[in-house]
Every structure is written in C-alpha cells, then in structure tokens.
Image: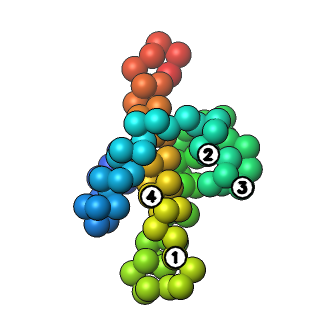
C-alpha cells in the first residue's frame, strides 16, 4: 500500500484550491477540525483518518468536476487542509521513537 504522502502527491487539483488548503492547514487542529469533516470523533490513528479523508475528498472532487450543485468549495478546502494536516502528523509520528 502506498503511504499517504505518495497518495497526496498523485492528486491533481486546481492550484487555487491547493493553495487555500495549504494556508488553512497551517492552523490545523485535529481534535477540532476532523470530527465535523468525518461526522464522528477523530480516529486514533492518523493513517486511518487520512484514508477516510482521501475517500471523501475524491467524492467532492467528482462533484467539482461534473459541476454538481451540491459541491462546496469551502468543504473541499477544509478536507484538503485536513489531509495535509494528517500527512504532517503521520510524518511527525514516524520521526519519533514511539512512531
């Protein structure tokens, strides 16, 4: 299985969307931002959260591409920001002796 960074690297999204998500990710707080996006408490493992976010982001990107009336750019940016934040946490955890 690919790691989260490789999966994120393969995403092709508009620069404006990614730029906004990167800015928002600077203030990412897992316990505050993740539950509203997932509709449940944050999973313990960052990888599990990232995979769930990737799945939801792909659905939003499909909506964006077809021009669905239900598409929300704000939600898409928040999802991408959470993905970036989780990827950073995965990296940080892998650099610690316990990770």
Comparing marks 3 and 4, which lies closer to the viewer?
4
Mark 3 lies on a secondary structure that is loop
> Which residue bears the numbered disc 4?
77
User: Residue drawn 50% across and 54% down?
Assistant: 78
Neighbour tally class for label 1: few under 14, some 14-19, many 20 plus, Cα within 10 Å: some
Measuring from the top left, give residue 34's x and y in whole percent.
Answer: 61, 45
Given residues 18 and 42, the one toward you in this image is 18
Measuring from the top left, give residue 66's x and y in whole percent.
Answer: 43, 86
- Name the quadrant containing residue 12: bottom left
Above or below, 30 relative to 10: above
Residue 60 visible to an observer of this rendering: yes
Does label 2 or label 3 sit earlier along the sequence? Answer: 2
Q: Are marks 2 and 3 in contact (CB under 8 Å)?
A: no
Measuring from the top left, give residue 72's x and y in whole percent.
Answer: 52, 71
> Which residue bears the numbered disc 1?
71
Given residues 30 and 55, the one toward you in this image is 30
- 31 to the left or right of 51: right
Which disc, if any, is residue 96?
none
Q: CA distance from mark 2 to mark 3?
A: 8 Å
Q: Residue furthest left?
A: 15
Q: CA distance from mark 4 to mark 1?
A: 11 Å
Neighbour tally class for label 4: few under 14, some 14-19, many 20 plus, Cα within 10 Å: many
Given residues 64 and 12, the one toward you in this image is 64
> Which residue bears the numbered disc 3?
39
Above or below, 70 relative to 48: below
Mark 4 lies on a secondary structure that is helix
> Which residue bears the numbered disc 2?
34
Q: Residue furthest right?
A: 40
Does label 2 or label 4 sit earlier along the sequence? Answer: 2
């Amino acid at each position: 299985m690919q790691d989260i960074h490789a999966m994120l690297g393969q995403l092709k999204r508009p620069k404006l969307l990614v730029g906004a998500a990167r800015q928002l990710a600077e203030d990412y707080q897992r316990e505050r931002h993740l539950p509203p996006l997932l509709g449940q408490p944050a999973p313990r493992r960052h990888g599990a959260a990232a995979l769930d976010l990737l799945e939801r982001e792909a659905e939003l990107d499909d909506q964006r591409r077809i021009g669905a009336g239900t598409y929300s750019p704000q939600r898409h940016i928040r999802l991408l920001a959470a993905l970036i934040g989780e990827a950073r946490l995965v990296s940080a955890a892998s650099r610690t002796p316990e990770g």
